Image (cartoon, rainbow, N blue to C red):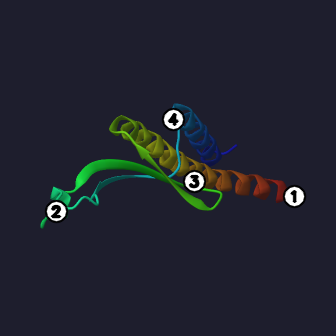
Amino acid sequence: MATNGRAHHTRYAALKRAVLTLGPIRRGSLVRRFMPCDKPGCCCQASPPELHGPYYQWTRKVRGKTVTVRLTREEAHLFEEWISNGRQLDRIVAQMEAVSLRITQRLVKQRRKP
């Protein structure tokens, strides 16, 4: 195997190891919201309003439908890490696909040589 081929295999192995370092993953997004209530005379109805919150919400798709769940501040901190892990996994997999493309192209090319 040529040096370039070894480099691709080494990179692919490093990416596999990177996946193993990730913690739990979650898909979706996390938002921090401040919202008004419906009570007349509440400070959130003033001008300028003093909204209630922060409220944390995790939103994701389940079978094509948007699902939103309220979280505590502590849960939001955990979900922030888990969502970040999911995004990191996506980046790693995209890199693995790119390296794998190079590896497989090289293998096919070698097999076609007479």
The answer to whether residue 35 is visible is: yes
| Mark 1 element type | loop
Which residue lies at the image location 56% right of the left edge and 37% below the top edge?
A: 19
Can you tell which mark lies on residue 22? Answer: 4
**What is the number of the mark on residue 50?**
none
Mark positioned earlier in the residue sequence (4 or 3): 4
Query: What is the crowding at mark 3: few (fewer than 14 residues within 10 Å), some, or many (at least 20)?
Result: few
The amino acid type of the residue labelled 2 equals: Pro
| Sequence-wise first label, 2 or 1 | 2
Name the quarter where the N terminus is drawn. Answer: top right
Look at discs 2 and 1 and give the one toward the viewer.
2
Which residue appears farthest toward the right when viewing the image?
A: 114
Specify the label residue 94 is tagged with.
3
Amino acid at circle 1: Pro
Task: Give the mark toward the camera: 4 or 3.
Answer: 4
Q: Contact (CB < 8 A) between labels 2 and 1?
A: no
Q: Residue at x 61, y 42 (%)?
A: 12
Across and down, in percent, residue 70 comes to 42, 47
Q: CA distance from mark 4 to mark 1?
A: 44 Å
Q: CA distance from mark 2 to mark 4?
A: 42 Å
Q: Is residue 8 left or right of residue 1?
A: left
Name of the residue lying farthest toward the front: 40
- Measured in 3D between alpha carbons, the distance from the residue under mark 2 to the one under mark 1, in whole angstroms, is 77 Å
Q: Quadrant of residue 3?
A: top right
Is disc 3 placed on a helix, strand or loop? helix
